[in-house]
Image (tube, helix red, strand yellow):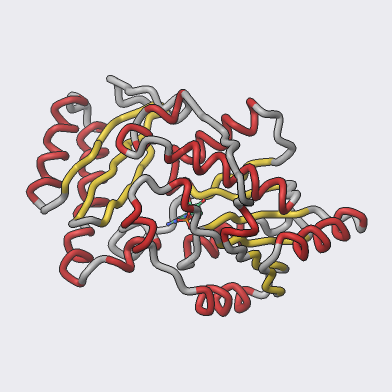
Amino acid sequence: MKLVRTRQELTEIVTQWHKDGETIGLVPTMGSLHEGHLTLVRALDGKATRRIVTIFVNPIQFNNPDDFQLYPRGLDADEALLAQTGVVDVLYAPDETQIYLPGFCTRITVSGPDKMLCGGDRPGHFDGVATIVTKLFMQTRADIAAFGEKDFQQLCVIRRMVTDLDLPVTILPVPTVREADHLALSSRNRRLTAAQRQQATHLPQALQDCLAALKAGKPVAATLERCTQTLQDAGFAVHYLDLRSEKTLAPSEKADPGTRLFVAASLGDIRLIDNMPLA
Ligand code: AMP
């Protein structure tokens, strides 16, 4: 695995790969890697002949400067973890100068799925995500890119953008990887204190209980309310808890297959998100 820090070196490598008829698989990340990220890398098995993982903590997708500053970082550990997989060709870890040139002023604006769920309390977040993901598609010249269902709304936004802008890349969705107690793996979990980590287990538990009640035919609104209350009692500030269509992310009043529960809730200043399908 080669660690690449500059755009120029990356361009030389991917240009040669294209000449040689290789296909390029991409896993974009913000680092602080865990098993969820490695599962995305493995999901590219047999789907691309070359694999690039990118690590870039993208400032323009953070609407809270403290959240950006406090986002966990550790390139050496990430590099060692990826090298161990034996299947990554390039780790591209640019600094901001390689991504945002002086005078940078162009952004992709997404609407539709941007306005709801995380788009509501993180204005501009998905514009920042869409912009960096497009830039990484262009810089890496990826044929296929893996994204986790852990960030289901992000996956929807990117799929929509790829369709709308005719981007020549296939999107590969990957199911959420969880801890033994079902908490979704996340780089942000590293910031939880031991006590908060124990509290955090209530998040997947509440979603599972909520799903069970919905499947048993309990009314949607009252069930969501009860689940929200359970999370608040466990010490969470709940930003949203909603049942939505997997296709459009529109709110659903009926617990049908093809709907999914979405939650964002904070412990202290650490914002956790999760989602689970009804079917
Ligand atoms: P991040 O580094 O958090 O921006 O995530 C990079 C990619 O990894 C995104 O496509 C995420 O959806 C995905 N990802 C993060 N955590 C998980 C997880 N627990 N399971 C599956 N994919 C994940």
Picture quadrant where residue 276 is located: top left
Q: Looking at this view, name the residue that lies furthest to the right.
A: 19
Picture quadrant where residue 225 is located: top left
Q: Looking at this view, name the residue that lies furthest to the top.
A: 253
Residue at (67% x, 75% y) in the render: 86
**Residue 146 at what x, y percent from top left?**
60, 50
Picture quadrant where residue 11 is located: bottom right
**Residue 110 at what x, y percent from top left?**
51, 29
- In the image, 276 versus 136, the foreground residue is 136
> Is residue 250 rendered to the left or right of residue 98?
left
Rendered position, 136 above or below 54: above
Rendered position, 195 above or below 97: below
> Is residue 185 rendered to the left or right of residue 88?
left
> Is residue 175 rendered to the left or right of residue 54?
left
Q: Look at the image and tell me in which quarter the N terminus lies.
A: bottom right
Residue at (27% x, 32% y) in the render: 242
Rendered position, 194 above or below 254: below
**Residue 157 at what x, y percent from top left?**
51, 34
**Residue 176 at what x, y percent from top left?**
44, 52
Q: Looking at this view, name the residue that lies furthest to the front.
A: 103
Q: Look at the image and tell me in which quarter the C terminus lies.
A: top left
Residue at (15% x, 39% y) in the render: 228
